[in-house]
Amino acid sequence: MIQTLILSQHAQKRCAQRGINPDHLPYAVRYGKCLRRQGFQFFFLRGKDIPSTVPPHTRGRIKNLCVVTRTSMPDLVVTVYRNPDALKNIKRKSQTLL
């Protein structure tokens, strides 16, 4: 499993803009559902995927968190966002870029 995540400048900016704590990103990578599309890995953390060992105040902040990494560089975070419909949107993407 990935030990350390490296945030790109874009991911750092998005975390700041969206109020996402970079310390919460490993939860999505470790426990979230992983889908590979278009050369990227999308880690989406659903509410039911959050283990009971996670403190209650953190659960609400990491629910519906999506972390995007490159397939070729899985420790480099490209972007981060929260979206309850992200899984549906990711599944709808084509497998390859056109």
Image (cartoon, helix red, strand yellow):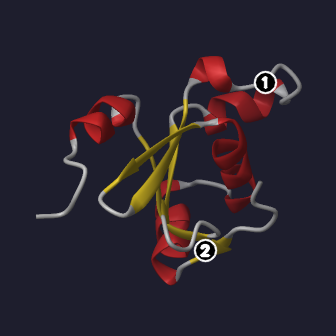
Please state the horizontal and vertical placement of residue 2, each as a whole percent of the image: 75, 60
Q: Amino acid at mark 1?
A: Pro
The mark found on residue 2 in the picture is none
In the picture of the structure, the residue carrying the numbered disc 2 is 7
In the picture of the structure, the residue carrying the numbered disc 1 is 51
Say few, some or many: other residues with alpha carbon within 10 Å of mark 1 (under 14 / 14 to 19 / 20 or more).
few
- Residue 73 figure quarter: bottom right
- 83 left or right of 72 in image: left
Q: Residue furthest left?
A: 98
Please state the horizontal and vertical placement of residue 96, each as a whole percent of the image: 22, 58
Q: Quadrant of the N terminus?
A: bottom right
Q: Secondary structure at mark 1?
A: loop
- Residue 60 figure quarter: top right
Please state the horizontal and vertical placement of residue 54, each as a whole percent of the image: 83, 30
Please give the name of the residue rendered at 38% of the width and 32% of the height, measured from the top-left corner. Answer: 87
Please give the name of the residue rendered at 64% of the width and 37% of the height, measured from the top-left corner. Answer: 61
